[in-house]
Amino acid sequence: MKSRKKQKTRILTTQAEMGKAVAAARRREKGATKIRHARYDVRRDAIIAELSTGSIIAVPRRIIPGFAGTRQAVLADLEITPGNEGLWSDSADDGVLLEQLVVLAAGERTVGAIGARINASKKSAARAAASRANGAKGGRPRKSAA
């Protein structure tokens, strides 16, 4: 039995494709919510983060898994991670992402319900075409009494 040797292939990406990919990434980055400023508020025992949207989110330290067991003084060195999408404390040797802060502040079920509503409101091309076809037939049939 002969052994097959895999031949290496190169994928060639054109300059135009790279340019389009970089431009798309920059557009996504501009629209993404980022952390502008963050601090630990000793009086409230909470992490306060100001976002690029102008919103301010406050999350109690005790519900942030990485910070719950730390002493309050440890969080004095809280800093924003590169990319402005998380917070890190060298003293605590732990951090938290913006997405985690939002889930902790609003609750996982609430964030999930909001995400489901947003996704349901988006129409794919196939869904829009089916909706138009159904409308041409007179719309959705009435529910019959069971």
Image (cartoon, rainbow, N blue to C red):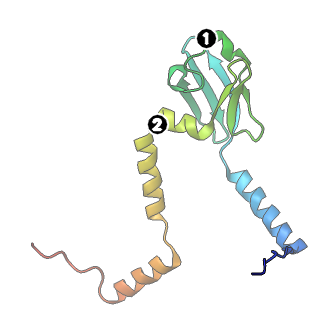
- The furthest residue to the left: 146
Name the side, left or right, on which 88 lies relative to 120. right
Taking the spot 30% from the left edge, 82% from the top edge, the residue there is: 139
Q: In this view, does 130 lie to the left or right of 75?
A: left
Left or right: 69 in relation to 93? left
Asked which secondary structure carries label 2, the reply is: helix
Q: Which residue is drawn at 78% across and 57% down?
A: 26
Please name the residue that numbered disc 2 is placed on: 106
Q: In which quarter of the image is residue 85?
A: top right
Residue 126 vs residue 7, the one in the foreground: 7
State the count of labels: 2
Mark positioned earlier in the residue sequence (2 or 1): 1
Describe the element under mark 1 as helix, strand or loop.
loop
The image's mark for residue 3 is none
121 relative to 92, above or below: below
Label 2 crowd bin: few (<14), some (14–19), many (20+), radius 10 Å: few
The residue that mark 1 highlights is 71
Which one is in front in this view, the residue at disc 2 or the one at disc 1? Answer: 1
Question: Which amino acid lies under the numbered mark 1 shown in the image of this protein?
Answer: Arg
Viewer-proximal residue among 139 and 13:
13
Percent coordinates x, y for residue 119 in the rendering = 48, 60
Residue 108 at what x, y percent from top left? 44, 40
Q: Residues within 10 Å of mark 1 (few under 14, many from 20)?
A: few
Mark 2 and mark 1: span between their CA atoms? Answer: 24 Å
Q: What residue type is labelled 2?
A: Ala
Which percent across, then down, holds residue 65? 55, 27
Residue 31 sits above or below residue 136 on the image: above
- Residue at 61%, 11% in the rendered image: 71
Residue 138 lies, in percent from the top left, at 29, 86
**Residue 18 occupies quadrant:** bottom right
Q: In which quarter of the image is the C terminus?
A: bottom left
